Amino acid sequence: MKERRIHGLFVLTVGLKGFYALVEMASGIALYLVAHDSIINFLSRFITEERLQDPQDWVASTAMKLAHSFSLETQHFYAFYLFTHGLLKLAVVIGLLREKLWAYPACFVVFSAFIVYQLYRYSFTQDVGLLLLSVLDAFVIALAVHEYRLLKKHLPTH
């Protein structure tokens, strides 16, 4: 019974990673398809309303600076990054859910690399979301190690 629960938890967390990968891919595609001027105009309109309410609003002022520095090249970088990051993650997730042996070592490498990068970014941004993603990735790795050991134990020996 314990193994069934662990497996169920593994499937659930990997499924969540898969859903998040699809969201990343869709976001990357949307970011690529939306005109750069539309993004800048939307941000400027939103930020201007906030600054009219409170001219000293630090968040709005900082967001305005970011909006003005958001270049077309930056937009394309983030579109490419989100799409490829999601695609890579989705490939690993599909492999894990189909119990493909290659997917387990790939999971260890890919999700470990994500953790390293997320912690690196956290050192600059202090974004708690990056820590939460890192914890989830570590949890998925731990469950994948457990699943991989079980899977290898049940493989026929030659």
Image (spheres, grey):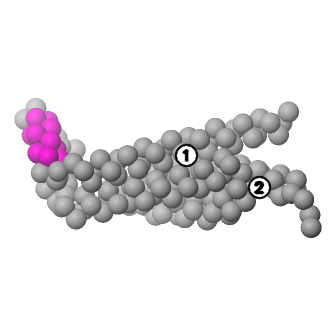
Give me the residue at 57% from left, 62% from top. 110
Q: Residues within 10 Å of mark 2 (few under 14, many from 20)?
A: some
Residue 43: x %, y % from top left: 16, 44
Q: Decide which of 45, 86 is in the foreground and name it.
A: 86
Q: Say which mark, if any, is on residue 60.
A: none
Give me the residue at 43% from left, 59% from top. 84
**Range of residues picked out in magenta:** 38-51
Answer above or below: position of 73 versus 7.
below
Q: CA distance from mark 2 to mark 1?
A: 18 Å
Q: Which residue is mark 1?
A: 17
Give me the residue at 24% from left, 50% from top. 33
In the picture, residue 157 is in which quadrant? bottom right
Residue 71: x %, y % from top left: 18, 61
Q: Which residue is mark 2?
A: 148
Q: Main secondary structure of the magenta part?
A: helix
Please tell me whether residue 49 belongs to the stretch shown in magenta.
yes
Query: Is 117 positioned to the left or the right of 12 in the image?
Result: left
In the picture, residue 145 is in which quadrant? bottom right
